[in-house]
Image (spheres, rainbow, N blue to C red):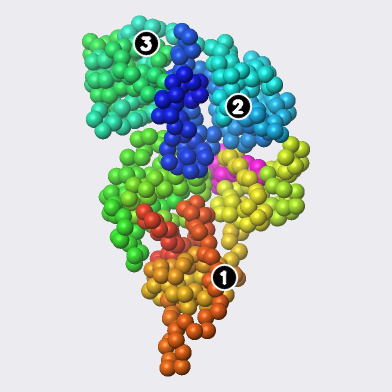
Amino acid sequence: IRNFVFSRKKEKADEAGERVMDNEDQEKERGITILAKNLAVMRGDYKINIMDTPGHADFGGEVERVLNMCDGVLLVVDSVEGPKPQTRFVLDKALQKGMKAMVVVNKIDRPSARPDYVVDKVFDLFCELGASDEQTDFQVVYASGLQGKAGTEANDLKEDLGPLFDAIIAGIDPPTVEKPEANNLQALISNIDFDSFKGKMGIARISNGSVKAGQAVSLAHPDKAKRTGRINNLFVFDNLGQKEVKEASAGEIIKFSGLDNVEIGDTLITNENGGANAAEPLPPIAVEQPTVRMTLGVNKSPLAGREGKFLTSRMIRDRLFKELDRNVALQVAETDSADRYEVSGRGQLHLTVLIESMRREGFELEVGPPSVIYQTNQDTGDVEEPWESVEVRVPEEYVGGVVDLLNQRKGELTDMGLDEGEGMSIVKYIVPTRGMLGLRSSLLTATRGTAITDSVFDSYRPRIKGDIQGRDKGSLLSFADGVTSTFGLEGAQDRGKMFVTPGEDVYKGMIIGIHQRPGDLEVNVCKTKALTNMRSANKGITVGLSSPIEMTLDACVEYLAVDELLEITPTQFRMAKNPELAGKKKGGKK
């Protein structure tokens, strides 16, 4: 898209950067789409509004609300790997709404590309999801996003993305408008934006009617009281930005200011003449329930308050509830403790992205381990837990280790085979979400970093009795408060792998490494070598220090056991035993 829109305007292409849509810092670092975004492209006399949605099921709330603004979908699949588990999630949502899909086989320039195989797999996926005859008769476009080329044949790509946009115009139906009259205005709010000068802004697609800047309007919702106001500024999307307009009609995607109490799921309707002839509100956006929860609270460790700008429970609470304005799949609840909040989301990644954003903003937090959300089946009365569909691509020699790990996590094997394209084995399992917590790091260890794992929520099933095996090794704990020393770490590294380096502040109960055996062990990493009149402090030191394990936020959250906490500051991740659970072990022993 970048190459197409700006192919004749090099200075604008340079200004746009390498990534037009995935321009958030975390999106660039993780290589995924987190937030849905809009842009508009003119192709002759046609205006094409394009929305980029996340493919990961953890951000399914973004997909569910944005689909309300679409008339069709482009299903982008890799020319080698084909459809992934995440592809199923997004495509299923679109097909349920009766949308037509067009398949784009991307990265067709890869040496091992196999477009015919990929198209067959996509067709099978459509059939599995119960697509109609019209939906399964999809058009295929072959493209190379890196080169900015597309074509209707895999071996005949044009010099730009023109064939892709021509296929959209020909294959995706334009908006259907039943009532174009101004009084019939209906626009479902699907996103919220914030501007330093204009305040809170709503983003919506006009389904019926039209709207003008300065018009008296209402925000209607089936379950809420009507709120009235006037539109101050009215914008439509134009290329990568937006332009201000006086009026917009049905089919346009608009952004407007003037209504500070706008919320996702509201319907914008007219309030001319007191709303006497106003239309009814549209059905609000339906979002699936969260499956994983974590606790976020005030950092209460001995090293708290040294770095962060936002430390108090009030600041944390305000930030979490502000997040609810845009993050429709998130839920925040008060707990028995005044300085701790329960945050629920679609998955561990969904929550860690929020925590990472808060860390970069200057918050200090204390985070508890993730846990799954159970529900009771209304028909049978049984307690059910979420299960996930998992696909692991791994070299053949490591398949045995992957199968052992997934079996230990109470998984059920659904398919296993060899991917002829890249010589990788594919293992497919259904695994309880409980078993998925902390699994990725174990898989990478067992496969020497070669495993590629994709997972997506599958369904709720009866809860498995008993615990699911988690970590098989304990933690190394700091014996006392102090500063780590080279001498202390030399003795401790014989007991396991370390997380810390010399000169770091530690406190009693802080996790400083992984024990090589089950069970926790306290070690004194702050002790220094005693001086005598016989030798100097550094004489006789011949053992070198091993490199510590660098722990990211995701790795720390996966590592946490039930009785452990994660301390997060703008520059540090520290794990420690939960003081409230100190001494409590299985069987009641202390």
Earlier sequence position, callout 3 versus callout 2: 2
Question: Residue 218 in the image: x percent, y percent?
Answer: 28, 20
Of badges 1 and 3, the one in the foreground is 1
What residue lies at 59% left-to-right and 35% top-to-bottom? 86
Q: Is residue 38 above or below residue 377?
A: above
What residue lies at 47% left-to-right and 71% top-to-bottom? 477
- The residue wearing badge 2 is 144
Mark 3 to mark 2: distance in Å?
35 Å
Question: Residue 68 in the image: x percent, y percent?
Answer: 46, 22
Residue 351 left/right relative to 215: right
Earlier sequence position, callout 1 versus callout 3: 3
Mark 2 to mark 1: distance in Å?
47 Å
Question: Do the residues under discs 2 and 1 have CB atoms within 8 angstroms?
Answer: no
- What amino acid type is highlighted by mark number 2? Ser
Question: Do the residues under discs 1 and 3 have CB atoms within 8 angstroms?
Answer: no
Secondary structure under the numbered disc 3 in the rendered image: strand
Q: Is residue 47 above or below residue 588?
A: above
Of badges 2 and 1, the one in the foreground is 2
Between 522 and 461, the one nearer to me in the picture: 522
What residue lies at 47% left-to-right and 77% top-to-bottom? 488
The answer, for residue 552, to whether it is visible in the render is: yes
- What amino acid type is highlighted by mark number 3? Ser
- The residue wearing badge 3 is 249
* Residues drawn in magenta: 376-392
Residue 267 image-quadrant placement: top left
- What amino acid type is highlighted by mark number 1? Gly
Of badges 3 and 2, the one in the foreground is 2
- The residue wearing badge 1 is 496
